[in-house]
Image (cartoon, grey):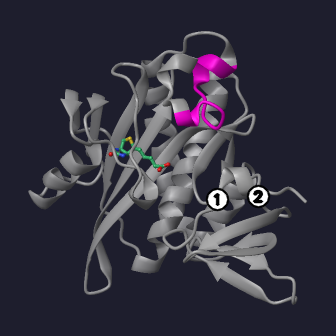
């Protein structure tokens, strides 16, 4: 991981650069980092904004030998590596809101966008993009996110070394990734459970304009969220289809 490492001052999106590299045959483990993005992308078509030099904006190119349905497990595992990294380097306790938003004190500090290309049901490559708010001050956060987002500096009360975070993240990710290749879903679930803040809680899920309420009970072997509905049935939701709005996050 990171033996081939690209560092940019500014790109449109590190995920886009990593995809171009993947298409031209770059090896699994290639990492792209940039100080700034002009068109950073988030999940569900959203933007990812971060002032230059204040965050970690990175994409890892993976060429895993797994089935397509296991791809979402990679981003769940990525969020585990991020939580551990945050704890180790900043001392803050971070938790995962399914699928892979990382929160500190209820506010989002990191997001993961995994994008993949497959051929005949087999992933050719996966790009795991990680955006971590490190040394942002409150004014650096987009105005409409100031109540729901945060940075490590704001939470820890001091500047945090981005280099230390990056080194730790790459090391931790590599360790988990190798274990995942051996242990699959069981390994991801066991790791993810240690950091999740959603299981056992009431959730409101937005799906195609409809809001569905229930209690989150487990994650499935394809990284879906299993929710017990009021009629007692258990339904699986996949990350591509749903959002759990933090303002509707109901810990009933
Ligand atoms: C989310 O919506 O929570 C996911 C955000 C992912 C942002 C990162 S920043 C580095 C990489 N490049 C992108 O364009 N997006 C991801």
Q: Nearer the viewer, residue 37 or 77?
A: 37
Residue 249 vertical placement versus 33 (above, below): below
Which of disc 2 and disc 1 is earlier in sequence?
1
Give the structural element (helix, strand or loop) at label 2: loop
Q: Say which residue label 1 marks.
A: 98
Is residue 150 at least partly visible in the picture?
yes
- The residue under the point 21% across, 28% down is 10
Residue 15 on image: x %, y %:
28, 49
Say which mark, if any, is on residue 212: none
Evaluate if marks 1 and 2 touch, with contact meaning CB atoms under 8 Å apart: yes
Q: Nearer the viewer, residue 212 or 103?
A: 212
Q: Badge 1, how many Cα within 10 Å: few under 14, some, many 20+? A: many
Residue 244 part of the magenta segment: no
The residue segment tinted magenta is 144-155
Image quarter of residue 222? bottom right
Residue 93 vertical placement versus 67 (above, below): above
Residue 89 on image: x %, y %:
60, 22
Image quarter of residue 123? bottom left
Residue 247 located left or right of residue 80:
right
Residue 242 located left or right of residue 15:
right
- The residue under the point 13% across, 60% down is 23
Q: Quadrant of the image for the C terminus?
A: bottom right
Q: Say which residue label 2 marks.
A: 198
Give the structural element (helix, strand or loop) at label 1: loop
Q: Badge 2, how many Cα within 10 Å: few under 14, some, many 20+? A: many
Residue 21 on image: x %, y %:
15, 51
């Amino acid at each position: 991981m990171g033996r081939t490492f690209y560092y940019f001052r500014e790109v449109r999106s590190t995920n886009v650069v990593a995809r171009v590299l993947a298409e031209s045959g770059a090896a699994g483990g290639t990492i792209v980092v940039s100080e700034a993005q002009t068109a950073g992308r988030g999940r569900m078509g959203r933007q990812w904004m971060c002032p230059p030099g204040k965050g970690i904006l990175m994409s890892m190119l993976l060429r895993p030998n797994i089935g397509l349905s296991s791809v979402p497990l990679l981003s769940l595992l990525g969020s585990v590596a991020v939580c551990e990294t945050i704890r180790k380097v900043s001392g803050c306790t971070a938790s995962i809101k399914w699928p892979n938003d990382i929160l500190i004190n209820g506010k989002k500090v990191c997001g993961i966008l995994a994008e993949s290309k497959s051929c005949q049901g087999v992933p050719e490559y996966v790009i795991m993009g990680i955006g971590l708010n490190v040394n942002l001050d409150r004014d650096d956060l987009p105005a409409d996110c100031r109540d729901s987002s945060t940075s490590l500096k704001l939470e820890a009360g001091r500047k945090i070394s981005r280099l230390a975070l990056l080194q730790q993240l790459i090391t931790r990710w590599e360790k988990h990734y190798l274990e995942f290749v051996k242990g699959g879903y069981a390994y991801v679930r066991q790791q993810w459970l240690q950091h999740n803040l959603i299981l056992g809680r009431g959730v409101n899920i937005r799906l195609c304009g409809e809001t569905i309420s229930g209690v989150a009970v487990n994650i499935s072997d394809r990284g879906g969220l299993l929710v017990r509905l009021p009629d007692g049935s258990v339904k699986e939701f996949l990350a591509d289809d749903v959002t759990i709005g933090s303002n509707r996050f109901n810990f009933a």
